[in-house]
Amino acid sequence: MAERRGLKTSEVQQRYAVGLARTDALPPEADPEARLARRHRLVAALTARGVRGWADCGTFYTRRLPAGCIPCLKGQGSNLCLTTLCNRDCFFCFNPEPRAEGMSVHGRAVSSEAQIPAILEEFDVKSLGLSGGEPLLDPDRVVRVIGRLRRRFGPGLRIDLYTNGDLLTPRVLDRLVSAGLDGLRMNLAVNGYDIAPVKLGLSGLAGVSVELPVIPWHRARLRRLVRELDTLGAPQLILHELFVSAHNIDSLRRLGCRLAADGKTDKLAWSPVAGSDEEALELLLYAMDQARLLSVYYCSTGTQQWIAEQALARRRSP
């Protein structure tokens, strides 16, 4: 695999590329016209209700954008994958198998934590997600990395930790906050939408959000989640389309998922599953009716495509 400025593309990214060579795909949706008509009605209803965002790229939010997403929408966000090892095995996971140790930042392999800041500086990153796998399999490393980044960048870098919450404890939370963590992004789809990890997170950190894929057949559970998070005082629910990649296609096919007919994403390594987009829009409408405090943000594959285009334009600009 080619090198750029002396830094190798990570092994994980190489395995992503190999997976993308697969020519199979989910079967196409049966009635795209009906789905698109439903989507048009939902967008019109959201617009009439005063939803915020940018309809042309499928970006909507009910009250406010998550703090970490604002730089990302400008092409100034990035990801630091600390490991692809995980204590869960979710059907929607897009990480390649076998799961492995090894860090990568902005798609580049790093052999030591000391290499990370220079890459972030090169791309003028203002918002960073620490992800996996499950990063809290090694909380000492997470705390160390946060501390290093905070010492280098001060408050000018937003740092969010992506976690399923299973391994969060009061002691770990205290260490993360003391190191300088800004926010937690919890995927509760992995635990049946149990908000207990969010309660724990909010006991020591205000910036605790839930971020998850919208599974089309989980409507009732997602609506209950909106109500529970609102009652709890959680600030944000962040929604993504359920998408298919080379590494989750077999699981999604077994579940009977189909590919959205209008889901071409030439800047992304994944495509949307039919029905997830409309369920996300339904959930936005529901939240506008039912939530008093909770803000819901929908980052669709259209949004992700637009973010990729912004980042690419920034890299090409002198």
Image: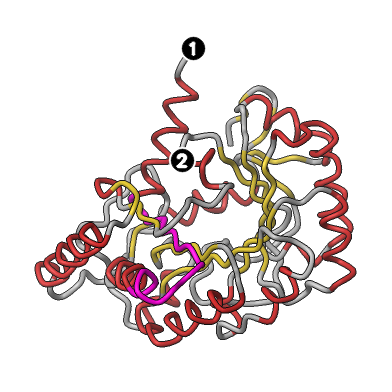
Relative to 143, 238 lies left or right:
left
Picture coordinates of residue 154, whole percent (x, y)? 79, 34
The segment highlighted magenta reads 286-302
Picture coordinates of residue 278, whole percent (x, y)? 27, 69
Do labels 2 and 1 touch, CB within 8 Å? no
Image quarter of the N terminus: top right
Picture coordinates of residue 126, whole percent (x, y)? 62, 35
Say which of 300 and 119 sits in front.
Answer: 300
Relative to 117, 65 lies left or right:
left
**Residue at (70% x, 76% y) in the render:** 199
Say which of 299 and 16 sits in front.
Answer: 299
Q: Which residue lies under the disc numbered 1? A: 318
The amino acid sitting under disc 1 is Pro
Give the numbered dot on residue 73. 2
**Residue at (58% x, 31% y) in the render:** 2
**Secondary element at image label 1:** loop
**Secondary element at image label 2:** helix
Neighbor class of circle 2 (other Cα within 10 Å; few <14, some 14-19, many 20+) is some
The amino acid sitting under disc 2 is Leu
**Residue at (40% x, 87% y) in the render:** 220
N-terminal-most mark, 2 or 1? 2
- How far apart in space, not on screen, are marks 2 and 1 (Cα)? 20 Å
Residue 231: quadrant of the picture = bottom right
Question: Residue lying furthest front in this view?
Answer: 292
Is 291 in the magenta?
yes
Closer to viewer: mark 2 or mark 1: 2
Neighbor class of circle 1 (other Cα within 10 Å; few <14, some 14-19, many 20+) is few
Relative to 287, 200 lies left or right:
right
Is 256 in the magenta?
no
